[in-house]
Structure formats: C-alpha cells, structure tokens
Image (cartoon, grey):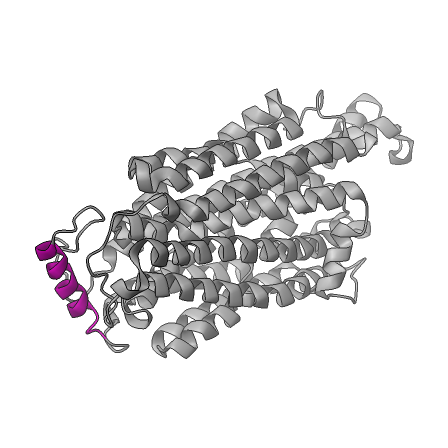
C-alpha cells in the first residue's frame, strides 16, 4: 500500500482543485444570468425562465452523451488528463460566449460545457483515496498485532466490515468536498454580483416596483426603468468583464495546478488496482445504465433514489433566482446572498451534521431524515410566495440535513473496485443528468406557466415590462411543490432499499473510520 503521506497529499490536491473550479463557475453563472435576462429575454421573466430551461436541457442532453466517455477516458488515460480536458473546455466556453456574444454562442456554450464535468474525475479519485486509507490502516493494524497474517486469510466478516468502513469513509469525503464546492461557488457568485455594475446603475437605488407595489405611478416608473435597461445591446456588456476575468482565473489556475501538482492515482495505487486494468471499450449511455441498473435490485433502488434527490437539489438551485425575481423582485446581489446562505447551510450539513448522523443514525437513518426534511423544506419554499420572503430563508434551512447525496454515493461506489470508479462516476453522472433534466423541466415549466396564469400573458408589453403586476399567489410555488413530491418518492425508495440490502452491507455500527 502507498504511504499515507502520499495519499493525503493527493487528497489535499483534490480539495484545491475542487475549490478553484467552482470559483470560476460561480462568477460565470452570474454573467449568464444577466446576459440572458437583459440581452436575450429583454427582461421578460417568463421568457427568460423558459430560455434558461432550454439552455439547461441542451446542456444536460449533451452531458448525457459525453459523461460515459469522460468516465472511461479517466480510467484509460488517467485522472490528470481528464482534468486538463475539463478545465480546457471551461476556458473555451467562457472565452467564446463572452467575446463572441450572441444568442447562438449562448446556446453553443451549453454544448461546449458538456466536457466540463469536474464531478466525474474528482468523485472517482475519492474512492481511490478512501479505499487506500482504510485498507492501508487496516494492514498496518494487523501487522502490529499479527505480523504473519496473510491478506487471503482475512475472515469474510472482516472483509464486510472493511467494505462498510470504505462506504463511511468515502461518504465523509464526499460530504467534505461537497462543502468545499458549495462554499466556493457561493462566495464566487456573491463577489461577482457585487463587482458587476450595469452602466446606468451608478449605485442608485432601483425604482423597479416590488410584488406588492401595484400603484399606477410606481408601475409606470418601473416600466420606464425597464425600458432604459433594455436599450443595452450585445456590445454593451464590458461591465461584466471583471466577473469574466474572475471566472477565467479560477479555471486557468485549476488547469495549471492539475498539470504541475496533481499526483496521478495510478502512480501510487497497487499494480492490481491500476486504473487501466479493467478499462471497458463500451462507453455508451446504455452501458452506463447497465452498470448501475443491470446488476441487482439494491443498486437499481439506490440509483433511483439518487436520481430523485439530485432532481430536487439541482432543480431548486436552477429556479432560486427566477423564483425570487418573480415573487420578491430580487437583484443579482439579493440572489447571491440568499444562495450563499443556502450553501453555507449545505456545507455545514455535509460535514458536521453528516458526521453526527453517521454516528447516531447510520447510513439508512441519515437518508430517512434527509428525505423527510426535503419534503418539509421544499413545501415551505413553495409557500414563501404567500408567507413572505422570510419563508425562503426558513425553507432552505433543510440543507442542514440534506446529506442524501454523499451517503448514496458512498454506498454505491463501495460496491465497485478502484479500476472501475471512473466508469461508475460516468454512469452516475448519466443518472444525474437525467435527474437534472427532470428537475429543471419541472421547475422552469411550472414557474413559466404560473407566471402566465397569475399575471396574464397580455400583461407583458413588447419591451418585456410587466404592466400592472398583480399579487403573486400559491400557484407561483408550483415548482417547489413538484420537487417536494420527488423527495417523497425518494423516501419510498429508501424504505425499499433497506429491504433489498445485501447481507454483507448491513454492518453499519462498530466500525471505526479515522
């Protein structure tokens, strides 16, 4: 087994890479939001929401095709080369969309970014590190107690305990990297929204009416302000350059660090765990599904569970800005501050709370709490249009117990050898891409229809100004009500998963993982 120092060095490299990439992504998302709302949709919120849904749909369909190939590429060519490809795609996306601005390049960026799937590489490295840490520690302990024991003489129960220990170790590592990612992308988005100053803002207060200010004079003033904003063309977006530079810095630094400082896992894994050893020539979407869905009922149930939970999580993130813009007239700064609050709670949940949950409730108990919390939190979010903006901050508090994703990943990845982790992560990303499509389809279509139902299509003038905006109601919360139903379905699958769990995986207590 490799020295623990080398393994820990690789683990630190993963944290750094997984910090730099979201720093670039967070700033870039802010640029895309402003570009879409002002330049393409002309401040028509229903149209902008529909366009964003189309952008996300195109992006996820493209990633459906490329994710299995990226996973196989990572297994065949190594994690480092795959990281270089991912950061290169991210840099190309930002450069083309910003410096050649048009609606065509906007949607072209959705296709280019299909190679920008950092999760596939990072989350395939984690099982390598987790297994190496657990098994190396186990070997060291056995050598101290019984030096002459051979690996082949390990009792079957001990092997099962080690398997559960690996699941818990990788679950903790997934949680920590998730916390790193969400904090990085949240801080980056907040900074980008602050440094982005539209040409006509000059720090003046925005006179656009809120959802409760429907007096004729106020609405007219808001429409004049909206019309003035819409005078900007594709040539007027130099004010976004600081955020673009910030995004490129994150991606370029990530590319350089991956190239010169990342330790390729094949250099310190045992020869029999070489990541090229079991590479498969079949890299289609169907083969990816077969890897997870064609093995046994237990894996099928876990895969379905991660699909529904991921749809809830990504669907919420994709609709927060448009939902807040519609109900509470949020600016980008308002949105990013809320997003940072949500991501801070999520980072606490996937580190401190997850660690305590694993100790007190085990893996399955943690999943139960996470799914039930999701139903409650998403319902409160849906009611926020009626209850008020404070309900948004309360509802998103469910992120404190949102630990399902790292738990499910840990249990699934523990079932596969290190030589297949790239394929497993590629297969999981296919599932997640389907989940993203499902969640995005629900939230964007529901919100667009809700806006048209509550406000009336005829209420939007040619410049995109919402004339005589009416009070938002319960229908406007439809996106989150739809996601709450998916969270309830995930809870049902968790109960089924307990029933079909293999006997050797039921040892959840009494195993110490450090």
Q: Is residue 271 above or below residue 225?
A: above
Asked whether, in this view, residue 82 is left or right of residue 137, the answer is left
Over which residues does the magenta segment extend? 216-232
Which residue is more in the foreground, 415 or 216? Answer: 216
Asked whether, in this view, residue 411 is left or right of residue 143, the answer is left
Residue 140, image quadrant: top right
Residue 311 in the image: x percent, y percent?
A: 55, 49
Q: Residue at x 51, y 32 (%)?
A: 373
Q: Image quadrant for the N terminus? A: top right
Q: Image quadrant for the C terminus? A: top right
Residue 109 in the image: x percent, y percent?
A: 46, 71
Which residue is more in the foreground, 158 or 207? Answer: 207
Asked whether, in this view, residue 199 is left or right of residue 333, the answer is left
Magenta segment: does it hold 432? no
Q: Main secondary structure of the magenta part?
A: helix
The furthest residue to the right? 153
Residue 17 in the image: x percent, y percent?
A: 50, 53
The furthest residue to the left? 217
Residue 509 in the image: x percent, y percent?
A: 70, 22
Q: Residue at x 73, y 56 (%)?
A: 289
Q: Could one spot residue 503 in this view of the protein?
A: yes
Please state the total of marks drawn on the protein image.
0
Q: Is residue 347 above or below residue 30?
A: above
Q: Could one spot residue 2 in this view of the protein?
A: no
Q: Is residue 322 above or below residue 350?
A: below
Magenta segment: does it hold 219? yes
Residue 163, image quadrant: top right
């Amino acid at each position: 087994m490799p020295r623990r120092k080398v393994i820990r060095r690789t683990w630190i490299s993963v944290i750094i890479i997984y910090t730099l990439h979201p720093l670039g992504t967070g700033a870039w998302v802010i640029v895309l939001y402003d570009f879409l709302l002002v330049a393409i949709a002309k401040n028509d919120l229903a149209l902008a929401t529909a366009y964003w849904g189309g952008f996300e749909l195109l992006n996820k369909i493209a990633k459906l095709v490329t994710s299995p190939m990226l996973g196989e590429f990572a297994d065949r060519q190594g994690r480092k080369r795959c990281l270089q490809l991912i950061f290169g795609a991210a840099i190309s996306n930002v450069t083309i969309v910003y410096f050649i601005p048009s609606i065509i390049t906007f949607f072209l960026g959705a296709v280019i970014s299909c190679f920008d799937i950092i999760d596939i590489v990072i989350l395939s490295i984690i099982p390598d590190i987790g297994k190496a840490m657990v098994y190396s520690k186990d070997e060291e302990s056995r050598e101290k107690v019984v030096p002459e024991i051979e690996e082949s003489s390990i009792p079957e129960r001990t092997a099962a305990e080690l398997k559960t220990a690996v699941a818990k170790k990788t679950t903790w590592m997934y949680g920590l990297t998730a916390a790193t990612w969400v904090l990085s992308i949240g801080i980056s988005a907040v900074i980008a929204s602050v440094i982005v100053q539209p040409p006509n803002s000059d720090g003046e207060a925005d006179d656009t009416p809120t959802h409760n200010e429907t007096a004729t004079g106020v609405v007219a003033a808001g429409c004049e302000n909206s019309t003035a904003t819409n005078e900007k063309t594709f040539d007027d977006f130099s004010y976004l350059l600081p955020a673009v530079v910030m995004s490129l810095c994150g991606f370029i630094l990530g590319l350089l660090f991956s190239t010169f400082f990342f330790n390729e896992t094949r250099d310190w894994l045992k020869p029999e765990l070489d990541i090229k050893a079991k590479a498969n020539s079949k890299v289609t979407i169907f083969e990816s599904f077969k890897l997870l869905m064609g093995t046994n009922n237990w894996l099928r149930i876990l895969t379905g569970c991660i699909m529904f939970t991921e749809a809830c999580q990504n669907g919420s993130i994709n609709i927060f800005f448009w939902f807040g813009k519609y109900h509470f007239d949020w600016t980008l700064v308002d949105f990013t501050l809320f997003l940072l609050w949500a991501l801070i709670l999520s980072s606490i949940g996937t580190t401190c709370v997850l660690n305590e949950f694993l100790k007190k409730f085990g893996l399955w108990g943690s999943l139960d709490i996470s799914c039930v919390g999701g139903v409650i939190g998403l319902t409160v979010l849906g009611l926020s249009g009626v209850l008020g903006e404070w309900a948004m901050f309360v509802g998103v508090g469910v992120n404190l117990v949102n630990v399902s994703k790292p738990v499910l990943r840990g249990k699934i990845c523990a079932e596969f050898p290190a030589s297949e982790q790239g394929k497993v992560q590629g297969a999981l990303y296919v599932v997640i891409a389907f989940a993203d499509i499902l969640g995005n389809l629900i939230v964007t279509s529901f919100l667009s229809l809700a806006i048209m139902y509550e406000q009336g299509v005829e209420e939007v003038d040619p410049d995109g100004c919402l004339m005589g905006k009416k009070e938002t109601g319960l229908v406007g919360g439809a996106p989150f009500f739809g996601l709450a139903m998916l969270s309830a379905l995930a809870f049902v699958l968790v109960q089924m998963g307990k029933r079909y769990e293999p006997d050797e995986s039921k040892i959840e207590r009494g195993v110490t993982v450090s």
